[in-house]
Image (cartoon, rainbow, N blue to C red):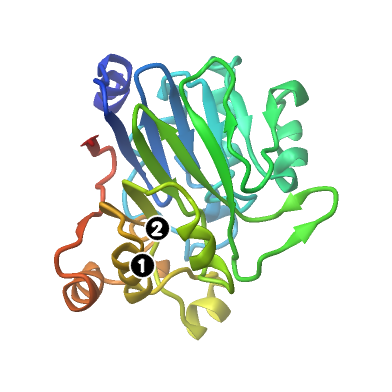
């Protein structure tokens, strides 16, 4: 059994705090006093089926079949590094009671993996919902990767999630750019304590040679954290695939220039951030 497995299983979360484990890319585990959930774990070599460009920089910090069963498994969109069938299939075998939260664009893929329809929740955008049998209030936030796509039946294609529990507010951006109205929308949300932002930049060569859609430039993430008053910024989507990352020194330079007093973190694979309000 991996160290990460044991830590997730045995850690007690005290009042006004939240435990966050980095799982690589945009994957995290989150534990509150009464709920365990995962967001976008990619714990396989699934992208190697596309091209040998997509070699991992490190092995998964925990094998999928050793992820402790969670109450909820959240997916921001259907790309393989977020909805990873080679993670979900072995995980679901030993965690059959987990419920899945995902955009309607992901439903067909989840059904193909054997997830029962009654265990799939498609959350409404910008409407807080209490996740059943948990202490978590969840709000789905529309994202734009690169466009803010919407379908009348499936809803928004790209999502981020606001997680409120135990007096702590955590925001997972999903893959996104800043789109018209995004900053104004974020100002209307509850104050965010910890924000995990996809911050691997973007450029023509990655977009055409990968192809790899990018995300926020470091200066954009720094400005958001500073202007919106976020307490702690987690740099996401910038570790697992060398082809699609930027140097962390460029992230630090942007923060030093734009928001020198901003608290920030890039979680190493399997690393625990224990946040106390």
Which residue is nearer to you in this view: 103 or 88? 103
Q: Which residue lies under the disc numbered 1?
A: 221
Residue 8 visible to an observer of this rendering: yes
Q: CA distance from mark 2 to mark 1?
A: 7 Å
**Label 2 with label 1: CB-CB less than 8 Å:** yes
Q: Position of residue 57 (x, y in %)?
A: 33, 55
The N terminus - image quarter? top left
Can you name the residue that lies furthest to the front here?
188
- On screen, 1 above or below 26? above
Q: Which residue lies under the disc numbered 2?
A: 197
Q: Residue at x 75, y 21 (%)?
A: 118
Q: Residue at x 52, y 54 (%)?
A: 48
* Residue 148, quarter of picture: bottom right
Q: Is residue 149 left or right of residue 51?
A: right
Q: Is residue 249 left or right of residue 26?
A: left
Q: Looking at the image, is mark 2 or mark 1 earlier in the sequence? A: 2
* Residue 73, quarter of picture: top right
Q: Residue at x 47, y 82 (%)?
A: 203
């Amino acid at each position: 059994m991996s160290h990460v497995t044991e830590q997730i299983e045995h850690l007690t979360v005290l009042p006004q705090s939240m435990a966050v484990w980095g799982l690589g890319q945009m994957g995290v585990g989150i534990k509150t006093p009464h709920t365990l959930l995962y967001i976008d774990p990619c714990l396989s070599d699934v992208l190697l089926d596309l091209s040998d460009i997509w070699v991992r920089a490190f092995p998964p910090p925990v094998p999928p079949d050793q992820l402790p069963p969670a109450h909820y498994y959240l997916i921001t969109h259907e790309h393989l590094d977020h909805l990873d069938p080679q993670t979900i299939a072995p995980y679901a075998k030993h965690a059959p009671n987990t419920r899945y939260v995902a955009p309607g664009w992901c439903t067909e893929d989840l059904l193909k993996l054997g997830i029962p329809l009654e265990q799939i929740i498609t959350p409404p955008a910008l409407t807080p919902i209490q996740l059943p049998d948990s202490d978590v209030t969840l709000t789905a936030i529309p994202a734009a990767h690169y466009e803010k796509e919407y379908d009348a039946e499936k809803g928004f294609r790209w999502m981020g999630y606001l997680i409120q529990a135990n007096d702590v507010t955590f925001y997972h951006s999903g893959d996104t750019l800043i789109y018209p109205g995004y900053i104004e929308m974020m100002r209307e949300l509850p104050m965010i304590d910890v924000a995990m932002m996809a911050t691997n930049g973007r450029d023509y060569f990655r977009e055409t040679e990968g192809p790899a859609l990018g995300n926020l430039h470091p200066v954009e993430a720094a400005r958001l954290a500073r202007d919106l008053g976020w307490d702690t910024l987690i740099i996401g989507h910038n570790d697992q695939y060398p082809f699609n990352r930027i140097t962390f020194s460029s992230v630090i330079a942007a923060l030093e220039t734009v928001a020198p007093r901003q608290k920030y973190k890039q979680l190493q694979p399997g690393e625990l951030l224990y946040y106390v309000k």
